[in-house]
């Protein structure tokens, strides 16, 4: 009831998700536009609480900019990208 009557009328969930989570694509576009090389090195990191975690190192022009951990490769890369995007692109 609450979701149908309130949230769906005022919030576009698809738009909100896209705006707040696709930092990797935005950062890649920014790097291409500004002629910077971007490299992700993402590897298995550890097992925490029975789940694998992955660590992603993000390099721009061969300089390490961010290192983040996530429950999947995608999550680790998005976290690293979000951190760097906020510094370079906002």
Image: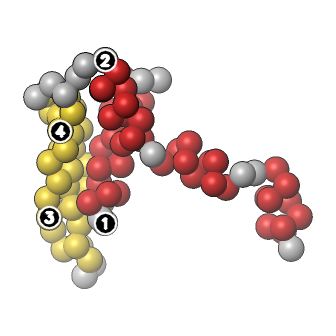
Image coordinates of residue 24 in percent, x first then y, are 36, 42
Local crowd at mark 4 within 10 Å, few (<14), some, or many (≥20)? Answer: some
The answer for how far apart the CA atoms under marks 2 and 4 are is: 15 Å
Give the image location of residue 58, x and y in percent.
Answer: 21, 39
Q: Nearer the viewer, mark 1 or mark 2?
A: 2
- Residue at the outermost top position: 34
Residue that numbered label 3 is attached to: 44
Dot 1 or dot 2, earlier in sequence? 2
Query: For this rendering, which residue is in front, 60 or 87?
Result: 60
Q: Which mark is residue 39?
A: 4
Q: Nearer the viewer, residue 14 or 58?
A: 14
First-in-chain label (2 vs 3): 2
CA–CA distance in space, label 4 to label 1:
20 Å
Is residue 87 something one can see in this rendering? no
Residue under circle 1?
A: 71
In screen coordinates, is 70 left or right of 14?
Answer: left
- Say the numbered circle drawn on residue 38: none
Q: Residues within 10 Å of mark 2 (few under 14, many from 20)?
A: few
Say if 79 sits above or below 60 in the image.
Answer: below
């Amino acid at each position: 009831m609450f979701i149908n009557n309130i949230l769906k009328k005022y919030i576009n969930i698809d738009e909100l998700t896209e705006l707040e989570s696709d930092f990797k694509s935005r950062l890649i576009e920014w790097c291409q536009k500004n002629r910077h090389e971007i490299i992700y090195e993402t590897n298995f990191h550890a097992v925490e609480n029975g789940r694998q975690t992955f660590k992603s190192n993000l390099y721009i022009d061969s300089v390490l900019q961010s290192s983040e951990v996530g429950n999947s490769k995608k999550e680790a890369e998005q976290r690293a990208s979000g951190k760097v995007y906020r510094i370079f692109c906002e």
